[in-house]
């Protein structure tokens, strides 16, 4: 039995970004913990933390510091004891955590596909020659440049609501968002269509929510163990090991997706040149119990096939 469960007098503090999607994720984490332990909502406090990545919207992520921009301030609050757990979109997370922190709790994964969003067109293939597509994702931009070199690609950052407003203002003819985020916000109808992985392999860990904690907090560990989704954990073990071996950052277009098939795991991955001029893809299958090893093996294969200088920063 867990000692010292949170109470309204001493609530468990949940750290999060302030976007509508980030808040949904924090509330879902709270809901899971309430259900697991029969706790009231007042036993938790949602703490919104401003992060650099949400305040600088006019520059590409690779130009202002990469993935850590969405996590740094939250992790500092976790290390300082200002919050007890931190809830993250896993595709925003660097593959290494600061000393003293660990990520070993994942909620059930949502739809991993990319959503095609447009006021005029139903799917990518319908876009006319020279159409403008807005995206802040280097991975999506590179995949689009590979498949549709005729398109004009523009920087497009901000939360779902901000991007929808930009589409309405005519900044772009279309954009791509994560289906998972739209579904969680009750906005699945915003997607004109879902892009299957065969056409556009998603970002590593897309659709997954992770809960980070301090290593030296056994009470919180026991609580998070109760809500951890095993299947999501196996899939992310493969994908994050793959990304770690590739030394993935916001400067390198990398896609990857692991799928469980009974006790087997199927992992697909691809690395691209930023301009979309070349793509190296591969896949591996093996026992789900060897998830991390499968991810590393696929990364090694892609690295072996990549010419020198293919990956930015390597």
Image (spheres, rainbow, N blue to C red):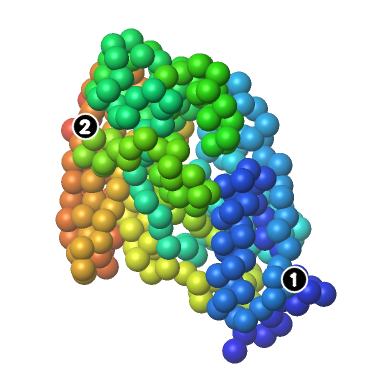
Residue 85 percent across, percent down from the top left: 64, 62
Please name whichever residue, 169 or 101, is drawn nearer the observer in this view of the structure.
Answer: 169
Residue 164 percent across, percent down from the top left: 53, 30
Classify 10 Å Cα crowding around label 1: few (below 14), some (14-19), many (20 and above).
some
Q: Residue at x 28, y 11 (%)?
A: 129
Q: Residue at x 57, y 63 (%)?
A: 29
Viewed as shown, does residue 192 lie left or right of 169? left
Q: Is residue 255 visible?
A: no
Q: In the rendered image, which residue does mark 2 sit on? A: 280
Write down the quadrant of residue 294 in the picture: bottom left
Q: Residue at x 18, y 46 (%)?
A: 283
Please name whichever residue, 159 or 138, is drawn nearer the observer in this view of the structure.
Answer: 159
Point out the frontmost of discs 1 and 2: 1
Q: Secondary structure at mark 2?
A: strand
Circles 1 and 2: CB atoms closer than 8 Å? no
Q: In the rendered image, which residue does mark 1 sit on? A: 42
Q: Is residue 183 above or below residue 275?
A: below
Write down the quadrant of residue 175 in the picture: top left
Residue 135 percent across, percent down from the top left: 45, 26
Q: Is residue 308 above or below residue 97?
A: above
């Amino acid at each position: 039995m867990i000692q010292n469960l949170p109470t309204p007098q001493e609530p468990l503090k949940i750290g999060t970004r302030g976007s509508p999607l980030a808040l949904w994720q924090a509330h879902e984490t709270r809901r899971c913990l309430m259900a697991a332990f029969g706790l009231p909502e007042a036993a938790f406090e949602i703490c919104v933390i401003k992060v650099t990545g949400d305040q600088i919207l006019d520059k590409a992520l690779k130009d202002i510091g990469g993935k850590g921009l969405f996590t740094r301030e939250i992790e500092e609050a976790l290390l300082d004891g200002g919050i007890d757990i931190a809830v993250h979109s896993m595709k925003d997370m660097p593959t290494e955590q600061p000393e003293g922190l660990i990520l070993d709790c994942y909620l059930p994964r949502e739809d991993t596909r990319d959503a095609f969003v447009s006021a005029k067109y139903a799917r990518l293939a319908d876009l006319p020659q020279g159409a403008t597509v807005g995206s802040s994702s280097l991975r999506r931009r590179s995949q689009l440049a590979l498949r549709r070199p005729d398109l004009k690609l523009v920087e497009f950052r901000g939360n779902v609501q901000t991007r929808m407003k930009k589409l309405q203002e005519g900044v772009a003819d279309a954009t791509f968002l994560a289906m998972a985020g739209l579904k969680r916000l009750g906005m699945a109808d915003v997607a004109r269509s879902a892009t299957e992985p065969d056409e556009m392999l998603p970002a590593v860990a897309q659709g997954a929510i992770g809960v980070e904690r301090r290593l030296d907090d056994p009470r919180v560990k026991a609580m998070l163990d109760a809500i951890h989704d095993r299947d999501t954990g196996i899939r992310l073990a493969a994908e994050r090991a793959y990304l770690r071996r590739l030394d993935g950052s916001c400067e390198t277009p990398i896609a990857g997706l692991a799928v469980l098939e009974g006790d087997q795991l199927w992992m697909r991955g691809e690395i691209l040149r930023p301009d979309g001029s070349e793509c190296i893809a591969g896949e591996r299958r093996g026992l789900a119990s060897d998830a991390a090893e499968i991810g590393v093996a696929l990364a090694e294969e892609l690295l072996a096939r990549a010419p020198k200088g293919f990956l930015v920063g390597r």
